[in-house]
Image: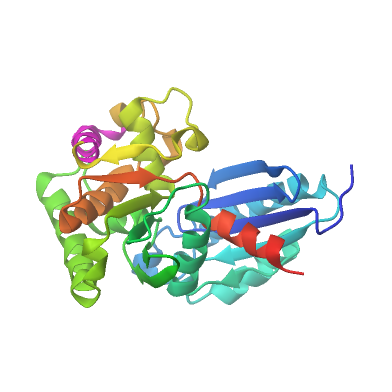
Amino acid sequence: MTHSANDIVAAIDIGTNSTNLRIVSRVTGIVDSRVTVTRLGQDVDHNRSLSEEAMQRVLSCLADYRQVLDTYGSYSLRVVASSACRDASNREEFFTRAGNTIGVQPELLSGQDEGRLAYQGCVSNLVLDPVGHLIVDIGGGSTEIMLGTTQLDIARSIDVGAVRITERHLRRDPPAPEELLNAIGEVQDLFEDLLREFPDMARAPQIIGTAGTIVTVAAVEIGQQVFDPAGLHAFRLTRSAIEDVFRTLATESLPDRVHNPGLPRDRADVIVGGCCVLVALMRSLDADEMIVSAYNILDGVCAELLGSP
């Protein structure tokens, strides 16, 4: 079946840890979603360049996604790239190769643009507190923090994420207590600097979390037998549950950790690093809970495509 380009829009997010696809119909909504762990940001924090091995993983994924997209005939596609590519000296070479593979040149997002799109997607189908809501998107290489009232007011990005914190601090398996303390300490210092600059963030009565780490922690908390992010939308994740999941995962070796229901096997090696970011955030905010959103930056990109002439 063929469609006009206005009927079908698609977004690809090339992230530090995964390369994700969302396909949306103007009529029926989301028609396909794919998440592939490609780890483009492997060693970027240290080397400041993308390795050939990591680039090949993403290019192979993009080739697969192009086959999926081509089944829809005509479509509008936007490809965005974030933290790992912002830090990489050879990103232009990678963008050329990626564009040749998928047919659209990737667009490098600034941290603020990433936050804006993540905000636009994350708040879909949630009742927002107009007094203030804080949106948190923990990625592989960076964390975006956005404050909104009746609209997006502030968007900031800090260079801590599940992959980056794992590579910087968590070298043992399971991580040593001092490694976990150092990881959480680094993230708390960065968060508290941000809260001093924007004190209204600490006063927001509603906290909403999105993206892989937060959705995965929620899935582990409820013991989801088949990982299904959409089934976690609007779930209330308490601080005590976050701390419990963190303690469980951080004290297990990788061969044991992979058996936790709700934890995708290909995220098990970086989930403790992601938990360090989440735990640090909740402690810095002294927050009791956050609301999980299954919608993310992909939905923000698709919304913009649907809204464009």
Q: Is residue 81 left or right of residue 204?
A: right
> Is residue 218 rendered to the left or right of residue 250?
right
In front here: 219 or 201?
201
The range drawn in magenta is 241-254
What is the x, y in percent for residue 50?
49, 66
Report the side of 81 relative to 32 (left or right): left
Q: Is residue 81 magenta?
A: no
Q: Quadrant of residue 4?
A: bottom right
Above or below 222: residue 121: below
Q: Nearer the viewer, residue 157 or 129?
A: 129
Q: Position of residue 2 (x, y in %)?
A: 89, 47
Quadrant assignment, res 71: top right
Would you say residue 82 is visible in this rendering?
no
Magenta: main secondary structure? helix
- Residue 108 left/right relative to 263: right
* Residue 199, image quadrant: bottom left
Farthest top residue in view: 225
> In front: 209, or 16?
209
Residue at the image point whose x is 17% and y is 58% from the top: 284
Quarter of the figure with the N terminus: top right
Q: Which sits in the foreground, 248 or 128? A: 128
